[in-house]
Amino acid sequence: MYFEDIQYACKTGVAMIFNPELECMEEEARKKLQLASLKNLVEMLYERVPFYRKRMDGLRLKPRDIHSLKDIEKLPFTTKDDLRENYPRGLLAAPKDRIVEVHMSSGTTGKPVVDEYTQNDINIWREAMARTLAGGGCTKDDIVQNCYGYGLFTGGPGAHYGAMTIGAEVLPMSSGNTARQLMVLQDFGSTMLTCTPSYALYMAEEAADAGIDLKKLPLCKGCFGAEPWSENMRKEIESRYDMKAYDIYGLTEIIGPGVSFECEAQDGLHVNEDLFYPEIIDPDTGKVLADGEKGELVFTTLTKDGTPLLRYRTRDITFLVREPCHCGRTTVRMHRLFGRTDDMLIIRGVNVFPSQIEQALIEIEGTEPQYLIVVSRGETHLDEVELQVEVKKEFFSDETRDLEGLRSKIENIMKSKLQISVRVKLVEPKTIERSIGKAKRVVDNRKI
């Protein structure tokens, strides 16, 4: 009866708030805390980081000019290019002998971005990720199967730190070796899964092929992030596993995962705003937008020591919500991501996000939530889009099915939703390359 007992406890458990004092703080008290942290941060960066001193001097701005949270708008933005140009340690604000851990991005599009952590930063990260996993229902009684990658990538270590801080048992699986993942999932009775949403679906596919009924396992909740995913993809994961699937958000430049997270309401992601100050700006003008207006997400790391950042432009598109959440947390919430300004495809003058395509595909019977967008420029110099879509095994193998009708249906839906025409190519199950990390959804062959 061991697994049955775990499953019952898991599915009837009540999510907790890890740090009620800070997560449920009154707004005015939080603003005072944020302002004090911001003043300390600006003074530290001006004194210790030549890059920021030069930027502020160029704006004729001194630390003493920061009197209110509104004054954050006077401060310069930081971009990913700034981080790459200062690789490896040009933005270090703490003495090197205080650095205890380093993480960085893959650097596939240039120099990697580096995040250096003091022990204080590690403690902040542990706290932020404990809040994050608790938002997804994690308690000390859980067994967390952590399938995010370890190493320089922040996903695996971040989830590991958070689960340990809560007191849960951690299975540090890292990514890949799916057959072993499924074996451990069954043998150890994991109750929480942490990985990218695309890998969660891949595991579900492999489980189905292996005859494993995931719905009979104790696993009942998961925290998924590191890539944009749609509400329909959430429903697909929840259906295949019979679990609650929670969205989490973070990025290497800020601290890793743990910047924001969903609670049981699944109505926006609570920002750990005593640690990370959020803004939404117009991506073209840099003007700060009001709550509820969609724009680019910007973060300032209020309490970091190693490589703190002022007004970092994430390129992620969302908006902020301050209405009360019934979970009891009073922190601002960010809507789940609509896409990224640098993921956005401009096709024949139309802005297209891959998440729009995913949202539509999951609603179409007979298709798998696996796709690849191939963009090219034809002989007429016009953009051409091929959308490769996997068809479910039972649909593809049934000769009586109208594959041409399905292809035509998808093309019509895409034209309606995207306002452009795409050429759909139906492919057999598992034809599109899978990823154990972030899914590759776009191949842009245009010479622009």
Image: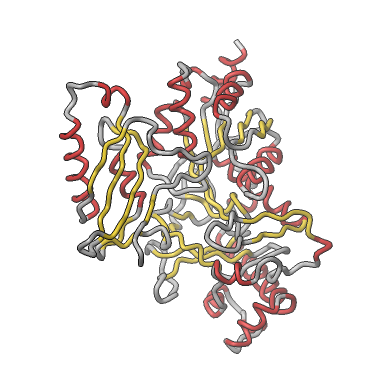
Q: Is residue 73 left or right of residue 117?
A: left
Quadrant of residue 191 within the rendered picture: top right
Q: Is residue 320 left or right of residue 28?
A: left
Tell me what residue is drawn at x 39 percent, y 32 percent.
430
Residue 248 position (above or below residue 185): below
Q: Between 26 and 405, which is closer to the camera in this rendering?
A: 405
Tell me what residue is drawn at x 45 percent, y 59 percent.
316
Residue 275 position (above or below residue 137): below
Give the residue furthest to the top: 1
- In this picture the colour scheme is secondary structure
Give the residue furthest to the bottom: 60
Residue 218 position (above or below residue 428): above
Q: Between 374 and 20, which is closer to the camera in this rendering?
A: 374
The number of numbered discs placed on residues in the rendered structure image is 0
Quadrant of residue 352 within the rendered picture: bottom left
Tell me what residue is drawn at x 69 percent, y 43 percent.
161
Quadrant of residue 431 within the rendered picture: top left
Residue 27 location (% of width, % of height): 55, 61
Q: Is residue 40 left or right of residue 375?
A: right
* Figure quadrant of the C terminus: bottom left
Tell me what residue is drawn at x 48 percent, y 54 percent.
333
Give the residue furthest to the front: 379
* Figure quadrant of the N terminus: top right
Residue 381 location (% of width, % of height): 23, 65
Residue 303 location (% of width, % of height): 68, 63
Residue 309 position (above or below residue 118): below
Residue 138 location (% of width, % of height): 60, 35
